[in-house]
Amino acid sequence: MRKSVSQTYFLTIATVILFGLFSMGILQIGMSIHYFTNERRQAMGTALDIMEVQAQYYADADPDHQAAVQSDALGQQLELINSTTQNMLMIANSDGLIVRSAGYEEHMNDAHLTQAVMQRLDGGEDVYGRDDLGGLLDQKYYILARRMNVGDSHFYLLACMRSSTINEYVGDMFSSFILSAGLTLLLSSVLSIVLTNRITQPLHDIGEAARRFGGGDFSARVAPSGDDEITSLAQTFNSMAVNLESIDKSRSQFMGNLAHELRTPMTSVKGFVDGMLDGTIPPEMQHHYLEIVSQETGRLARLVQNMLDITKLEAGEYKVHARSYDVWETLTGVLLANEQRVLAGKIVINDLAPVPTMVYADPDLVHQVVQNLMDNALKFTPPGGNIRFDVKRLQPGIVEVSITNTGEGISPEALPFVFQRFYKEDASRGLNAKGSGLGLHICKVLITLSGGTIRVDSKQGEWCRFTFTLPEPPAPPRQRRGGKKEG
């Protein structure tokens, strides 16, 4: 079963919290036990110190030390110390006989310490541990014992604390920990659910918008809120949606334009052919209309070829074979190829002053660009008008080529759109029906592939100029002494 982001996030947070609480609880209980045992040991040590002071006082006051230690007065002092420190107290004589005790339910007087216990105490240092004094106690106690010397005799002082005291303390600590951990986990769960919903809701919105988008609703958008990564994702999705919607509109427009461009010449061809077949067009006029059919067929062929060129160029299938060559070779070659159209249109070509200018580009691509721009200039230059070619080194590394023609020019409103596919500005330039509206778009794609840029400038009613740039050839490596090349 697939887990949602909410479930994964909640389980992750819960696992981290539980692990943290468990680790913190173990550490806290361990530290508390250590603190409690140290505190109780200090309390037992304090109790022994007071017992020793009191026993020493009564022993010094009575030459019979044994009788002084067994006196009721000292017993009362032991009961007072017991009620204050909550420790069971015992005093044993040198034979191990317990002569005084306080705080134990059973009568400890007349009981004996084992030899093992006394041997450990005879070492001279306080002894601390957990023991039952050889069965003398009903369970193991935490015991702090000390030997006290009084004159020629000695006594054993013991302060005992039940093990159950620590167990009760640990139990109380564990209960408090469980309660606090449960409350913490509950509050954390509520907060994680709230935070998860805040995080996942935008993701749900993005997913819903993506499903609508995948279903063909290109108007689907996500309303971003905040400034986190999910908001950035929503903004990226909206940008993608805008781009895809634009592409879809462009595709629809492209298909509509393409259908229109194909339908127009095909309708003309079919009409003229049907007219000749059914006799509407007399035999003496058929040659004229066959020439029109040939022109329309040629227009269809050029349109199809242009579409193939655009498809290859935009798909990246065309390989650029750049080399260094003089760009004037292309300009003069195109001019000579169009000589008949120039003469037929009575167009004046301004004096050419070719100065060898080297560029680094694919000659075939540049030739197609110049041919398209020349064809465009010939269409819209009126009889007696001028066409001018200019080439100059714009700056180090860039060569600028421009083709200018006189005529109606392009309106300022149309200038931003002239390089779009199928764009025609019939109203301002008198663009004839023979154009497909693809030539300038192809020019832009080809120049971009060549590493340059293309732009158009115009003064409506006077002139129009198309300008493109090409890179210069890379500088040859310098020769170093000894015939080796640098770079």
Image (cartoon, rainbow, N blue to C red):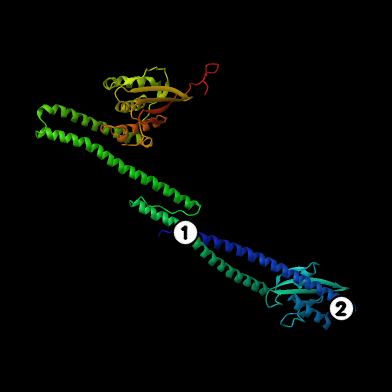
CB of mark 2 within 8 Å of CB of mark 1? no
Question: Callout 2 environment at 10 Å: few (<14), some (14 to 19), or many (20+)?
Answer: many
Find residue 363 and report its image quarter.
Answer: top left
Q: Position of residue 408 (x, y in %)?
A: 33, 30
Left or right: where does residue 262 sit relative to residue 165?
A: left
Quarter holding the N terminus is: bottom left
Q: Residues within 10 Å of mark 1 (few under 14, many from 20)?
A: few
The percent coordinates of residue 172 (x first, y second) are 63, 72
Q: Residue 472 location, x and y as percent?
A: 44, 24
- Above or below 45: residue 339: above
Give 1 or 419, whichever is nearer the viewer.
Answer: 419
Say what secondary structure mark 1 lies in.
helix
Q: Amino acid at mark 2?
A: Tyr
Element type where label 2 sits in the image? helix
Along the viewing direction, whichever of 193 and 51 lies nearer the viewer: 193
The tally of labels here is 2
User: Mark 1 — residue?
Assistant: 8
Give residue 464's position: percent from left, percent from top. 37, 28
Which of discs 2 and 1 lies nearer the camera? The answer is 1
The residue type indicated by label 1 comes to: Thr
User: Nearer the N terminus, badge 2 or badge 1?
Assistant: 1
Tell me: 462 left or right of 297.
right
Determine whether, in the image, residue 444 is placed left or right of residue 180.
left
Say which residue appears at 85% left-offset and 72% top-offset: 149
Q: Residue at x 41, y 47 (%)?
A: 240
Question: Where 381 sits versus 228, above or below?
Answer: above
Whether residue 98 is visible, yes or no, is no
Mark 2 to mark 1: distance in Å? 74 Å
Toward the viewer: 140 or 167? 167
Res. 68 in view: yes
Mark 2 — residue? 58
Residue 337, quarter of the rendered image: top left
